[in-house]
Every structure is written in structure tokens, then in C-alpha cells.
Image: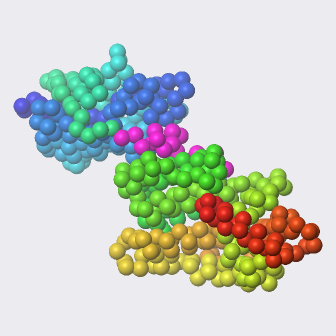
Amino acid sequence: MKTVKTATCCLALTVALTVATHLPAGAVTLGDVLREHGWANVIGTWVDADTGGEVVKITYAWRFPETVIEITSRSQERETVALMGLNAKTGEVGQFGANSRGGVHMAKWDVVEGDAVIGLAVVTEKGKEVNLEIRHHRVDEDTMVLSIGGPKPTTIRMVRVEPAKEPAQELARAPAQELQLQDAGIDPRMMGLIKAALSKRAGVKDEQMAEALAGIVKTVLGVQAQGEGFEMGAGLRTHLKEEVGLTDEQVGMVTGIARRLEWGKREAKRKKEGTFTEGDTVVYVETSVRNLDADGNLTVEEGELEKGFLGMLGQYEECHGVLLTLFDKNKDGAIGKDEGKAVRELVFSALEMMLYDQNRDGKVDDTEADQAWDSVAEQIERHNDGILRRFDRNKDGELSDDELKAGRARAGQRRGRGR
């Protein structure tokens, strides 16, 4: 047993999942390399079969989906944490780790006859340098044999005790969700606002962020494909709640932010191309119209727009710097149901106004306000024109009672469909 304990101490210090040293054609992520060589199923928790984990227990988990794997191992003498990643320039997969006693290691991987072989350079807590080679042989989906070389070769049979989880496979294949969102037309500045809204204002933890963003990616793609009628699938909602640990309110923010991103992107595209249909105008500014249209005639007059716009500026400045205090009213460090509703409403309004707060001082100065006014007024003007073209049957430039009734009924139908 002494030989096994000695070997497994080294194992606990160094062992991790294995992949090819060189990047296969077409592979761009660590996840791609794993799948290429049949080792993607290593994600999960493994224990030595003889003692059920008393000698060694190892967990492989995605730290950043598709790009970085975190390996945590525990033996009778120490605990070890390591990170594994792909060098995109050289195509090599490397690993660096440290243990609870102060030892460190670096490693590179290769595949020999289907077995994953790791070459390790270890520096113990006493400064002693040790070189090791560990060969991983897969017996079946839930069993692998580790052969540890050295003066006293050791073989350990490892079995899986928890099923593999592949969150990135369902949610997003790309190496980084930020890149996916950028490809979808979301600029880096808006990306920063999204992450701030999720973390600082909604309480999404750092370790949950990648998958929360992956959920936004999936929802954006769904909205692009299906339009505003898209509803988050039960599988994605369950994953974000049960496996990632997001609350109902946080999952709601993922959906809401994604919709806002897609609608905003469409608006920007239409502005650039000069195309903006009547129906799209009504959908995009419907919320603003309901807030600004004091007399309920489906159009926004200049006085209504000015009063509502000044209110938006005041609300934004009032909210700046006190968001967390406002949200977490019971000071429990979490956001409850009522607080979550306030988060969504306030974050969405703040995100809109922050587009105009160019110097990020929490206020919209005169120049910024002029730019904001021009943008909002332009949207409302297009909305008014679209309403008249759509419902002003006699083309007299005004809506009669019957025309107004028809317009309100149509707007109610859209809201009933969740648009």
C-alpha cells in the first residue's frame, strides 16, 4: 500500500484529462481536441476503484466552457488544483497546477496508440525536481487505468462516480461567448454593460457568467430564427437553474437581455440601411409609446415626448451609483422575486440611457442629451408616421375614433402574443 500511496500523491499532484499534443485540422478549442481523440467523456468525477476515493479522487470540470478545464484532485496527503488549456499558436495542450503543500507542476500531453500520455515536470514543496510519465488507458466509458512510471511503477484503476456534464455542447460551441455575441453584432462596450448587469446588479457569480452568456447567445440565435415569438426552451431554462444555479429572476434577465440585444441590433441595421417597416416600428417602440402617450391616441406629441424624455434622464441619474442598495433591500446578498423585477426594469432603462452617457459619469450632459433626444425623437417620429399610414384610412392626418379603436385593438393583440 505504501507504493500506491506514494504514487497517488504524485497522481493527485499532476493527473488530468488528456488530449493530443498537436492541434488537429479544423479544431479551434480544447473541447474540439477532446472530441477529436475520444476523451470528451472524461468530464466528471473519478475515484480509485479499490477504496472508492479514499486514496485518490479527481474531478474534471469546464472552468470556461470549451476552452479551459479545471482539475481538482484529493489524496490522503494533499489537494491539488490545475488548469488545462490549448495554445492556439503551437497547437499544444498544456497544464499548470499547484497543491496545498506548495508544490507545483507543468505538463504537456500526447496520444500514443489511443492512450493519453502526459509528461510532467514537478517541483515539490522542498524544491526537489521530479519528472514523471502517466499513461491513461480507457477501458470503457466509466473506467480507465492509470499507469504511473518511475522507480516504482504503479497501476490504478479509476471509475466514474458522477456522469459527465457538457454544458457548452448544448448552449454554445464557440470558444468564448463574448466572441459569439460580437459575431452577432454586439460591440465590446455593450458586452461590458451586459456582464455588469448580470454580475453587479443581478448577482450572477463569476463561475456562472460563461454559461449565463451562453444562454444569451442561444436566446439571441433563437430570436433571430423565430422572431419575437421565441420562448426559451425548457431544457435551457432547466440547465441554467439546476446545473448553473441561476434563479428564476436571473434566467429571466438572460432572456430579456437577449431580446433587447436582438431588437437593438435590428434597429441599428434599419437606421444604417434606411429601412424600417411600419410593423417593426410599432413593435420596437411600443413600450416607449405606452409610457409617453399620455392622452392614449397611439401617437406621441412633442409635449409628451419632452416630458417623458426629461423623466428618463432624471431616472437614469437618480439610479446611478445606488443600484445594489436599491435592489438588495433585505441586505441578504441575494436578489429576491420583487427585487429581481426591479432589477430587470431598471437595468433595461439604464442600459438604454447609458448608450448616451459617453463619459460614464452617471449623468447625461447637454451634448449627450441632444444626441439622445435626436435618436428618441427620430424613433417616435417614425412610429407616428407608421401609425398614420397603417390606421389613417381616410388619409386626413388624424385618427378618428374608429381608426383609433382599430389601432388599440391591434396593439393589444401584439401584447397578447408576448411581443
- The image quadrant where one finds the C terminus is bottom right
Give the residues in magenta.
165-186
Q: Is residue 260 left or right of residue 56?
A: right
Q: Is residue 353 above or below residue 184?
A: below
Residue 289 location (% of width, % of height): 72, 73
Is residue 176 visible in the rendered structure shown here? Answer: yes
Residue 66: percent from left, percent from top: 45, 39
Q: On the picture, is 11 further left or further right than 165? A: left
Residue nearest the observer in this picture, 354 or 131: 354
Quadrant of the rendered image containing residue 206:
bottom left
Tell me which residue sits at (69%, 72%) in the image.
Answer: 288
- Does residue 184 belong to the magenta stretch? yes
Does residue 405 appear left or right of residue 117 in this picture? Answer: right
**Taking the image as drawn, is residue 358 in sight?**
no
Residue drawn where x is 88% and y is 75% of the image? 398
Q: Which residue is found at the position 44% from the left and 47% from the top?
A: 235
State the quadrant of the N terminus: top left
- Quadrant in the picture for residue 277: bottom right
Q: Residue at x 51, y 58 (%)?
A: 254
